[in-house]
Amino acid sequence: MGASSWPSAAEVRSPLQLLSDAKKKVAEMSGRDVADVRVVISPYRICPLGAHIDHQGGTVLAMTVNKGIILAFVPSCDRQVVLRSGQFAGDVKFRVDEEQLPRSSMPVKEKDSSWGCYARGALYALQKTGKKLNEGIIGFISGSDGLDSSGLSSSAAVGIAYLMALESANNLCVSPSENIELDKLIENAYLGLRNGILDQSAILLSKYGYLTLMDCKTKEHTFVSSSMLNGAKSSERANKYKILLAFSGAKHCLKDNPGYNCRVAECQKAAKILLCASGAESVDPRLCEVGPSIYEAYKHKLKENLAKRAEHYFSENKRVHEGVKAWASGNLVEFGKLISASGLSSIQNYECGCEPMIQLYEILLRTPGVFGARFSGAGFRGCCLAFVDANQAEAATAFVQREYSKTQPELALQVPGGRVALLCEAGDSARVI
Ligand code: GLA
C-alpha cells in the first residue's frame, strides 16, 4: 500500500477514525466482537484519458484516489443479509438464497430503487455465475463524505464492496479479473446500464503511484510508471501534482439517465455502418473492430451525429497512447493538454455533459496551476477532475470555489458542505482488511 493511500495507517489504527466507527456499528448490529469485523476498502476512481471509449473496446487510463467506500461486515452465520448505510436511511434485508432477477426486467412498481439495489445486484451476479453462497453478511457501508453520485464511480465502488464482502464471508477465492466481470454483470445485466469496464478495472487493479492502462477489447492491462517518480521517496511522490475534484452539485443517477445508453447505441450504429461499408457486416459492431484506415476511408458515410461519436472514439484512443508517453516521461504539461483536449472532445464530439459541468470545465481551464481538466465520469452530472501543480494547489482550490459559486450560486450551495473543490491524491486497489 502506498504512502498516501486511503485510509492511511493512522486511520486504520485510531479508534476514533472512520474504520473503527464502522466496525463498532457492525459489532452492535451483530452482537459480535469488534475484532471479528472485516472491512472492504473500495476506492473511487478517476480516468484522466479514455472518456467514453471503454464500452467500444477502446483503451483507457485510470487511477484510484484516496477517497472511497468502506464496508464493515461479519458473516451472518445464516443466509440473511442485513445492511445499514452511513448516508441512506433504512435497513436493507434479504436472503442469499432468494433468487435475484435483473432490475431492468422487473415491472416498475417492483423495482428495488432503494440504496440496497447494488447489494442485490452483487448477489445476482454471484448467483448468475454459479457461485454457491451459504452465508449472508451483516454490514455497515459508508462513503467518503458527500462524494456519492459525483462521477467518481461510487456505484462500481459499492458493487465491488458487496461482491468482496459476500465472497469473503463464503470463503470464495475470486480474482480481480473475475470481479471485473461480476461487477459488469451488476451494471449491465442487473441495472441495465450499458457501460464498459473502466470503473471496475480501475478500482480492482490500480497500484499506488502508477496509471493503469486497460485495453477494454482484450481486457489486458499494464501499469505505466512515471519518470517524475523515479528515485523519489514515497513521501515525495505526490509532490509534483495533486488531483483537484470540482463538484457541480448536479446529481442525476447514471442508471436512470437515458443519455448514456443512447450514446452507446450511436457508437454501435456508427461501427455497423463502417463495418458494412468495408464488407465486414457480420463483425460485432463496436468501434474497436474498425481499423483507423477503414474509418478514414468510409467516415464520409456517417451522418453528422454518428460522425462526431466516431471522431471522439478515434481521437480519444490516440490521446490515450500519447498520454502514456507524456506520463511516462514525466511531462505533466503535455499530459494536461491531452486531458483538456479529451474534455473538449467529450463536449463537442461526444456531446455529453450539461451546462454547469461545462462551466466548471471552463473555470478549471483558466485556473492558475491547472495542467488539464475534464469531466470525471460520464459528464452528465457530478464532478470534473483536474491535475494541478502541487505548489499552486491550494490557491487553485480557492479560485475554483470562488468562480463556480459566482457562476452557479444555487448549485454550489447544494454541494455537500458547500465544498466545491477538493484536493486528493492517488490511491490503491480495493481490498479486504
Ligand atoms: C461511466 C461509465 C464508464 C465509462 C465512463 C465514461 O463512469 O460507468 O464505463 O464509460 O462513464 O468514460
Image (tube, rainbow, N blue to C red):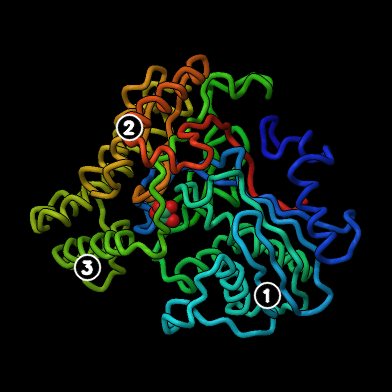
Q: Is residue 167 left or right of residue 245?
A: right
Q: Does the CB distance between marks 1 and 3 fall below 8 Å?
A: no
Q: Is residue 169 left or right of residue 297?
A: right
Residue 331 in sight: no
Q: Residues within 10 Å of mark 1 (few under 14, many from 20)?
A: some
Of callouts 2 and 1, the N-terminal one: 1
Of callouts 3 and 2, the N-terminal one: 3
Image location (x, y in percent) of residue 262: 27, 63
Residue at mark 3: C-beta within 8 A of ligand 1: no
Determine which residue is flagged by label 1. 93
Q: Amino acid at mark 2?
A: Ser
> Relative to the observer, which residue lies in front, 193 or 289?
193
Q: Residue at x 34, y 51 (%)?
A: 380
Secondary structure at badge 2 equals helix
Secondary structure at badge 3 equals loop
Which mark is in front, 2 or 1? Answer: 1
Above or below for 169 versus 128: above
> Relative to the observer, which residue lies in front, 212 or 165?
165
Determine which residue is flagged by label 2. 340
Q: Which mark is residue 263?
A: none
Above or below for 149 versus 383: below
